[in-house]
Every structure is written in C-alpha cells, then in structure tokens.
C-alpha cells in the first residue's frame, strides 16, 4: 500500500513467496467464501484479493468478481488467472453503490485506518448489499507478536510504532460497522490454530517485515533468531512442526 500514514512500512508482497509460505491462507478461507454464497449475475468486490486464489473460486459461481489489492506483484498474479484485478488502496475505494457484495479474507487487519476502509465498503455496496469477511481478531498471533516485541526490546528498540496490524474485538468492530450504517448479522472471534507449512521462519519472512524495517541485515537476523527461540517451546511440537496461534474475526453485515 502507498499511504504510509495508514499502512506499515517495510511490508512487501511477493506472490511466489506467499504461495510457498502461506498457501494455507486461501485454503482456510473457503469457509468464509461459502458464507458469502455468491450467485450468478451478482457483482462482487474481493477486497485484498492477493494472488486471486479465492477470487477465482468466487468467479466460478457465475458472479462477476472484481479483485483489488495494494500489491502490484499480487495483482499481476491475479491477472495471470484471467481475473479483473486492480491495484487499489482499500483506504480510498472509488466505488459507489456498485456491488451486491463485498468479500474479504485475511486482509483487513493490514488496513490500519479501519474507519476509512469500512466507510468505503459501505459506499461500494448497493442498498441491501452484504459484507462478508474474516481477518485477524483480538488475540491473533499473540505469542508471535510478544516474541518479536521482546526480541526488539532486548536491543533497545520499541516495537510499538512498528506494530503493523489492527486486531479488534467483536465489540470494537461492530461499533465501527454500525457507525458507518451497517446492520450486523453476525460477528464472532474464532480461535484457529494453524499449521505452518514452512515453519515459523517462513511465516516471519512473509509477514513480520514491518517490525524490522530500516534495520541492518545482521540485526534483523538476530531478532528473528531470538523470536524463533522464544516461540519454540509453545508453538513447535516434538516432531518439529509449527502451529501459529491464529484467532479470526468473522463478520456478516448488510448495508
């Protein structure tokens, strides 16, 4: 994303690396995609579409799906699937009463000015249109965050300003939705321990860059090594498999 006041610096997305380290994101998004229940002829916005894996599945319903993401590399990957995919910052959505539904999976927690994003989603929907989303909620990757912050603090670096995510409680996010005009049908936190196919090292390489932005390579590596050591007793099993402490916030609302 391009607006530094709304988005964490240092996070770059690479579609190939993402597919290698985090293919579980789209796979585990199937449940919320089924909740959307797209229908032929509908026009749907996939907000934070990434490489288009879920966007493509939505389009198979016969709906017309537009995917948007702030990453040029991810959008190129989505376009390679033949999708209508556009580079856009979700804080500045240009749509007005255009979509029957807005869908988002594993993206909204990266969008730090959530009020602006929610207002844009509301504007993009037709009257009666639905908003279905799942993203990091309160307590998401708490152990991972604590380990990274501790590794930074041990070197006299404050992680508070580097924290890149918005993990709200259901009450907080309901308040934002209702303030924008939404009627909330359902909102809940869902603990979802998630196996990491390339371990914690792959996860950190994919998602933790904002914590390390501007640091030299040796210092980055030392912080990552310390975070991994701190996390091993709680997130790595006896066979060497890593499981992240995910907590998702699932939302269903209508304009």
Image (cartoon, rainbow, N blue to C red):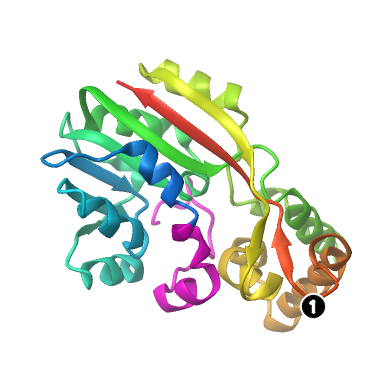
Q: Residue at x 66, y 67 (%)?
A: 212
The reply, left or right, for residue 2 in relation to residue 28 is: left
Q: Quadrant of the N terminus?
A: bottom left
Q: Nearer the viewer, residue 104 or 37?
A: 37
Which of the 4 quarters of the picture holds residue 242?
bottom right
Q: Residues within 10 Å of mark 1 (few under 14, many from 20)?
A: some
The answer to whether 242 is drawn above or below residue 219 in the figure is above
| In the image, farthest residue toward the bottom | 218
- Which residue is located at x 65 percent, y 68 percent? 204
Residue shown at 56% from the left, 69% from the top? 206
Question: In screen coordinates, is 89 left or right of 114?
Answer: left
The x, y position of residue 38, in whole percent, is: 25, 40
Q: Give the residue at the far left of this rendering.
A: 41
The magenta region covers: 1-27
Q: Visible in this render: residue 214?
A: no
In this image, 178 relative to 207: left or right? left
């Amino acid at each position: 994303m391009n607006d530094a006041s709304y988005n964490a610096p240092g996070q770059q997305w690479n579609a190939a690396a993402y597919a290698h380290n985090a293919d579980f994101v789209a796979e585990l998004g199937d449940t919320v995609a089924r909740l959307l229940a797209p229908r032929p002829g509908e026009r749907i916005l996939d907000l934070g579409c990434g490489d288009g894996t879920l966007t493509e599945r939505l389009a198979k319903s016969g709906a017309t799906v537009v995917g948007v993401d702030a990453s040029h590399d991810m959008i190129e990957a989505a376009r390679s699937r033949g999708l209508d995919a556009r580079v856009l910052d979700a804080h500045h959505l240009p749509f007005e009463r255009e979509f029957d539904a807005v869908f988002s999976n594993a993206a909204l927690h990266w969008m730090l000015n959530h009020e602006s994003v929610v207002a844009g989603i509301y504007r993009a929907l037709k009257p009666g249109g639905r908003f279905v989303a799942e993203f990091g909620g309160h307590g998401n990757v708490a152990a991972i965050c604590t380990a990274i912050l501790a590794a930074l603090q041990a070197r006299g670096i404050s992680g508070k300003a580097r924290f890149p995510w918005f993990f709200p409680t259901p009450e907080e996010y309901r308040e934002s939705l209702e303030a924008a005009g939404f009627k909330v049908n359902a909102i809940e936190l869902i603990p979802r321990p998630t196996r990491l196919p390339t371990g914690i090292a792959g996860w950190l390489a994919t998602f933790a860059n904002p914590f390390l932005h501007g640091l030299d390579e040796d210092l980055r590596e030392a912080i990552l090594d310390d975070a991994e050591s701190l996390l091993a007793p709680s997130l790595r099993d006896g066979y060497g498999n890593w499981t992240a402490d995910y907590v998702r916030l699932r939302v269903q609302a209508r304009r």
